[in-house]
Amino acid sequence: MENKGISQAVIGRLPRYFRYLGELKDQGIERVSSQELSDIMKVTASQIRQDFNNFGGFGQQGYGYKVEYLYGEIGKILGLDQTHNLIIIGAGNLGQALANYMNFERRGFLFRGIFDNNPALYGRRIRDMEVLPMKELSSFVRENAIDIAVLTIPKNCAVEVAEELVKEGIRGIWNFAHVDLNVPPDVQVENVHLSDSLMKLTYNINRYETHYDA
Ligand code: NAI
């Protein structure tokens, strides 16, 4: 489906639509109107229609969207109709936590390997994967058709590791290291900063307190 030129704000809302539609689907609900979706998701119905219009509107005909169809189409836009092979680089606290979180696999994100440069960790099993040394990274990426790397390493080495991954043909980096990576335009990077979310929380706490005090 054509989705060039669509704003990142719209793309950023798609996973949430996908999640809610998945829940409706699991409840056996076949149709939902934009108003009903609006009530459940606390987004205006006009926002929902505008968002969906970017993709041709998904054919709402008076009495609602077909849940399963919409779920499938949004899944396709998000690339979830294919499986993705992932590796984790950095088998510390965060890398292990991500490796142990099974739900990614339900969405087709398959963890294939976990790497570290600390020899004390080599061979340690995390779920069904053994921690591998960094010298095996390049051949592993090529031989296992790895398309996404998760970086859970310190920021001082993340740029260099990303460059190596790019050379081996990685297509996407899920970057938890607090540093901007230098990658060519055909490699996608998604930076994750949990602290951003926490700061939004404190902003809202403070705003509520100010409002309440006034
Ligand atoms: P950790 O110290 O438990 O794990 C880091 C692992 O990376 C260690 O096992 C270490 O041996 C390995 N490592 C270091 N240099 C390496 C290299 N050149 N190649 C391969 N492996 C290497 O740290 P933790 O808590 O798991 O955090 C990992 C990273 O994620 C840190 O950079 C931290 O700042 C960041 N982080 C980011 C968050 C976010 O929201 N973006 C949240 C939490 C941590």
Image (spheres, rainbow, N blue to C red):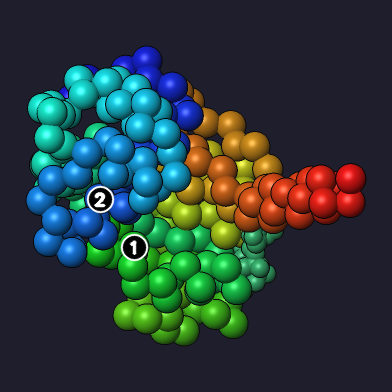
- Mark 2 residue element: helix
Q: Residue at x 59, y 72 (%)?
A: 92
Q: Residue at x 19, y 44 (%)?
A: 32
10 Å neighbourhood of mark 2: few (<14), some, or many (≥20)? many
Q: Residue at x 34, y 62 (%)?
A: 104
Residue 17 in picture, x, y percent from top left:
33, 44
User: The residue under label 2 is which amino acid type?
Assistant: Leu
User: The residue under label 1 is which amino acid type?
Assistant: Phe
Residue 45 in picture, x, y percent from top left:
35, 32
- Measure the C-alpha gap from mark 2 to mark 1: 17 Å
Give the residue number, with chain letter if any, for mark 2. Answer: 21
Residue 191 in picture, x, y percent from top left:
56, 43
Nearest to the eye among marks 2 and 1: give it. Answer: 2
The numbered mark at residue 10 is none
Q: Nearer the N terminus, badge 2 or badge 1?
A: 2
- Quadrant of the drawing holding the C terminus: top right
Give the residue number, with chain letter if any, for mark 1. Answer: 104
Indicate left or right for 116 with 211 as reference. left
Q: Is residue 12 above or below residue 120?
A: above
The image quadrant of residue 22 is bottom left
- Mark 1 residue element: helix
Q: Depth check: give the residue in front, 29 or 195.
A: 29
